[in-house]
Structures are given as C-alpha cells and as structure tokens.
Amino acid sequence: MIQQDLQLSRLKYDFQPASPLTGGIMSRLICMFVVFGFLLLPLNAMAQRGQDFAPYQMGDQELTLSGSGVSDNSFDTTNLSLDIGYGYFFSQGWQGLIRQSLNIIDQPGDNAYNASTRIGIDYNFNLRNLRPFLGATIGYMYGDGVKNSFIAGPETGLKAYLSDSAFVIFAVGYDFIFENADEAEDAFDDGIFNYRLGLGYRW
C-alpha cells in the first residue's frame, strides 16, 4: 500500500482540461461503486446459506493486520510493507477507524523508511458471515523518499468471518494526494487504485 503511496508522491498535479484519460479514471471509480452495489444481492444470498455469526453491535472493536514483501533474487534489496488498523463501531453499521502503514526499503548502503497515518469511516453491512463495507479515509504520508502530503480517497471491501471474532479482509481503495484543499479536486483525477488483503479480529 505504501509502495503505491510512493508512486502517488511522484505525480505532478498541474491543471489540465478534461481528457479521455481523466474520464476513464472517473468511469472506473464510478464502476467500482456500481459493482459494489450489484454484489450486495449475490453476497446476501451467499451469506444466507453461510453460518450466522454474531452481528455488529455498538461498542464492538476491530484490529486488522496485513503485510507484504518483495526481494531480488540475491536478497540484496528487500521491501517490506505493514498495515495495521483499529476500528470502533459507534452503531451497528457505522465504524470509525485509524490505520497506520509502514514501508521499509532495505538495500546495500541505503535504507529508507516511510509511512502514512489515516483516519476514516466505513459503513458495514450485516450479512451473516460475509460483511461488505463502504467508506473513505483521509490522512498524511511522510518519510524518506516521499513528499510529505495529505492522502485521501474512498474504499470498499469485504470481511469474510471465520468465527464470531476472526475474519479475512479484502479491500480496494482509490488514493490521491494533495498539499492543500485547493489541489484536492485536480489531484483526484491522478489517483491510483490500491488493494489490501489481511486478517482481522473483533471483540
């Protein structure tokens, strides 16, 4: 996820008239939410056949953890990414969250560390063992090799519960970065999609 934040930090957000590329990005973003809406029906049908785990309740808390890594064939250069999140339900569906991401780049003679810290809100659908969600986050990215900037965007995903407490989470988001509010609208068109797969625990 931070690797994608790194890519975002190198983008230039000069104002340009609307273009086919911009339209394509917006179309894909709209498509992401339309597909999410259509998936609710089959997911609901699948969930009805699955095990009925405890629904969300106000006061529930969640901890999620995901990570990834890549090395060259001689292991001289290694890139490790870690994402940890905490969520609190202030109703049966609405959840506030904070998420911390860390990226470590280890290469001969030059190590780098960068991170992003975000807050956000998601709405979770109680569909027995399959729990889709939809929301948005905003935060700040900082560290070595990145331009300190704000980062924000919508997200959607699915939590597949294995028990009343444990679940697997898959999420897709659309991230864009900006230095101030005036740049936010233009920067939105230059964002990228990110994907996250991890494990979670609810109590």
Image: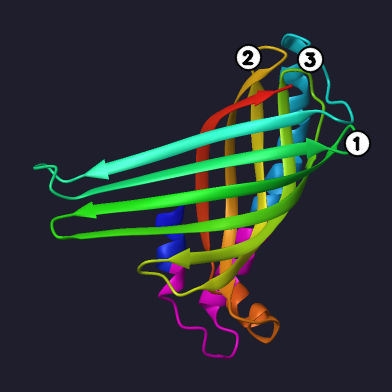
Q: Nearer the viewer, residue 166 or 39?
A: 166
The stretch in magenta equals: 8-31
Amino acid carrying label 3: it is: Gln
Identify which amino acid the numbered label 1 is placed on: Ser
Q: Quadrant of the C terminus?
A: top right
Lower sequence index among marks 1 and 2: 1
Task: Give the foreground label among 1 and 2.
Answer: 1
Residue 182 place in picture, x, y as percent: 68, 86
Q: Position of residue 94 (x, y in %)?
A: 85, 41
Secondary element at image label 3: helix
On residue 91, the disc is: 1
- In the image, residue 171 sits, relative to residue 6, either above or below, namely above
Q: CA distance from mark 3 to mark 1?
A: 22 Å
Which labelled disc corresponds to residue 162? 2
Q: CA distance from mark 2 to mark 3?
A: 15 Å
Q: Residue at x 51, y 52 (%)?
A: 194
Q: Is residue 12 on the magenta stretch?
A: yes
The residue depicted at 71 percent of the width and 51 percent of the height is 33
Amino acid marked by disc 2: Leu
Q: Work out whether mark 3 precedes mark 1 in sequence or the reverse, and give the earlier one.
A: 3
Question: In the figure, 62 relative to 203: above or below?
Answer: below
Horizontal and vertical percent position of residue 187 = 59, 77
Residue 158 picture quarter: top right
Q: Tag on residue 70?
A: none
In terms of image quadrants, where is residue 163?
top right
Determine whether, in the image, residue 102 is placed left or right of residue 121: left
Q: Residues within 10 Å of mark 1 (few under 14, many from 20)?
A: some
Q: Nearer the viewer, mark 3 or mark 1?
A: 1
